[in-house]
C-alpha cells in the first residue's frame, strides 16, 4: 500500500518537474517583401539594345543573391512574351537586355525572389511611336491576363461547388 501511495505522489511530482524546464522557442523571422525598383526607361528607341534593370533591397539592404527574371511582352500578346534572366551587376542591381524591333506598347514584370519571398512589379514601356488609339490598356485585355484567367477559373469552380451543393441537397430531400 505504501508503494502505491509513493507512486501516486512521486510520478506526478516528476512529471511536473520535467515540464517546468521548457524554454521558450524564439519566434521564426518572416522575411520582408523585397523592394524592387525598376530602372528601365519607360520610353525607348527601336532597334537599339535596351537595358532591363531592377534594384533589389530587403530590409533596407541590397540583395545580391536574388533571382530576377524579366518577363516582357507586347500589349495584347502576353502569351508570346519572353522570360529573360537578370544577372547581378553590383549593389543589388540586376540587368538583362532586349531589343524592340517595331513600334508598340510593351509591358515588363521584374519577377524577383529574395530569401524565399516573391515580388513582381510591372512597368509599361513605349517603344518608338506607336499609334496609341490602336493600343488598349493591358487591364482591358482580359483574355490575355493570367490573373484574370485565374480569377475566372476560381469563379467557375465556386459556381460548380454551389451547383454540386444544390445537387446534394436535392438527393438528401428525396
Image (cartoon, rainbow, N blue to C red):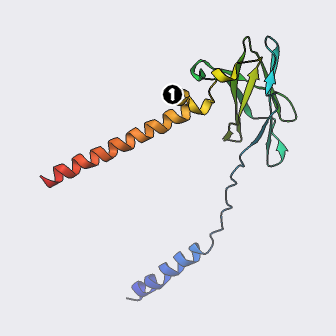
Residue nearest the viewer, comparing 62 with 17: 62
Quadrant of the rendered image containing residue 106: top right
**Residue 74 visible in the picture:** no
Left or right of residue 78: residue 32: right
Task: Tell me what residue is drawn at x 81 percent, y 16 percent.
Answer: 45
Q: As displayed, is residue 136 above or below residue 98?
A: below
Quadrant of the rendered image containing residue 156: top left
Residue nearest the viewer, comparing 57 with 77: 77
Task: Tell me what residue is drawn at x 42 percent, y 84 percent.
Answer: 3
Left or right of residue 130: residue 40: right
**Residue 75 visible in the picture:** yes
Task: Tell me what residue is drawn at x 18 percent, y 50 percent.
Answer: 170
Residue linked to disc 1: 143
Residue nearest the viewer, comparing 49 with 55: 49
Quadrant of the rendered image containing residue 141: top right
Residue 10 locus on image (x, y percent): 49, 82
Task: Tell me what residue is drawn at x 62 percent, y 30 percent.
Answer: 138
Q: As displayed, is residue 112 above or below residue 5?
A: above
Residue 167 locus on image (x, y percent): 22, 46
Residue 95 locus on image (x, y percent): 80, 25
Instruction: Say what secondary structure mark 1 lies in.
Output: helix
Quadrant position of the N terminus in the picture: bottom left
Residue 85 locus on image (x, y percent): 72, 23
Amino acid at each position: 500500500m505504501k508503494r502505491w501511495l509513493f507512486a501516486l505522489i512521486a510520478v506526478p511530482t516528476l512529471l511536473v518537474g520535467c515540464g517546468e524546464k521548457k524554454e521558450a522557442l524564439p519566434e521564426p523571422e518572416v522575411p520582408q517583401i523585397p523592394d524592387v525598383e525598376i530602372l528601365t526607361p519607360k520610353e525607348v528607341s527601336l532597334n537599339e539594345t535596351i537595358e532591363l534593370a531592377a534594384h533589389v533591397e530587403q530590409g533596407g539592404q541590397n540583395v545580391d543573391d536574388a533571382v530576377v527574371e524579366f518577363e516582357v511582352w507586347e500589349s495584347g500578346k502576353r502569351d508570346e512574351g519572353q522570360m529573360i534572366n537578370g544577372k547581378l551587376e553590383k549593389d543589388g542591381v540586376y540587368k538583362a537586355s532586349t531589343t524592340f524591333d517595331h513600334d508598340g506598347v510593351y509591358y515588363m514584370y521584374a519577377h524577383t525572389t529574395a530569401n524565399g519571398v516573391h515580388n513582381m512589379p510591372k512597368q509599361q514601356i513605349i517603344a518608338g511611336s506607336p499609334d496609341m488609339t490602336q493600343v488598349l490598356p493591358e487591364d482591358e485585355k482580359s483574355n490575355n491576363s493570367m490573373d484574370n484567367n485565374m480569377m475566372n477559373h476560381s469563379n467557375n469552380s465556386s459556381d460548380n461547388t454551389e451547383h454540386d451543393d444544390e445537387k446534394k441537397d436535392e438527393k438528401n430531400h428525396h
